[in-house]
Image (cartoon, helix red, strand yellow):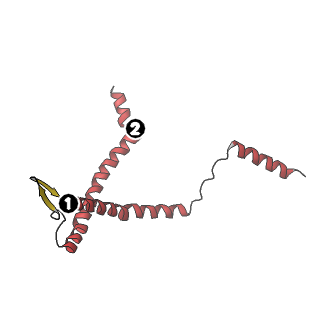
Amino acid sequence: MLKGFKEFIMRGNVVDLAVAVVIGAAFGRIVSAIVDGLINPLVAAIFGEPDLTGVGNFELNNAKFSIGLILQETLNFLFVAAAIYFLIVMPLNKLAERRQRGVEPEPTPLTTEQELLTEIRDALRARP
């Protein structure tokens, strides 16, 4: 029973997933710091309020509605997505492009039909 558990834990994909979760959590804190420390203060400077949660509040039958909360969370999502794209995805894509420039693509293997046609072509060329 313990041997099976050990094999399960030591599989590459389980270890990779664990590493991804830990790195993702740490990276999430960096992105949150960028949004909270840089982008949200810019929003506060533009709109004159620290966030939009106070905008569009109303009450109906003792139920409180907050349109500003929805707007704030939507903006936070867009800011996080933009931070991830411009600070991580785009530079990694550029790096991958640079690495691929010097590498020739591997030729695709020929199908059986293509191999036969190649042999026929070569045989025809060899004829006098």
Q: Give the CA separation, mark 2 to mark 1.
A: 47 Å
| Foreground residue among 31 and 8 | 31
The disc at residue 103 is none
Q: Are marks 2 and 1 in contact (CB under 8 Å)?
A: no
Q: Residue furthest top?
A: 1
Q: Position of residue 83 (x, y in %)?
A: 32, 63
Q: Position of residue 95 (x, y in %)?
A: 46, 63
| Residue shown at 9% from the left, 53% from the top | 62
Kind of element beneath mark 1: helix
Q: Position of residue 121 (x, y in %)?
A: 80, 50
Q: Is residue 21 above or below residue 4?
A: below
- The local crowd at label 1, few if under 14, some if 14 to 19, many if 20 or more residues have their Cα within 10 Å, is some
Q: Quadrant of residue 42?
A: bottom left
| Residue shown at 34% from the left, 63% from the top | 82
In this figure, which residue is indicated by the disc labeled 1?
A: 67
Horizontal side of 57 relative to 116 (left or right) equals left
Q: Is residue 76 above or below residue 124?
A: below
| Residue shown at 30% from the left, 62% from the top | 78
In this figure, which residue is indicated by the disc labeled 2?
A: 11
Q: Nearer the viewer, mark 2 or mark 1?
A: 1
Q: Is residue 73 above or below residue 15?
A: below
Amino acid identity at mark 1: Ile
Kind of element beneath mark 2: loop
Query: Mark 1 or mark 2, which is nearer the start of the sequence?
Result: 2
- Which of the image's four quarters has the N terminus? top left
Q: Quadrant of residue 89?
A: bottom left
Amino acid identity at mark 2: Arg
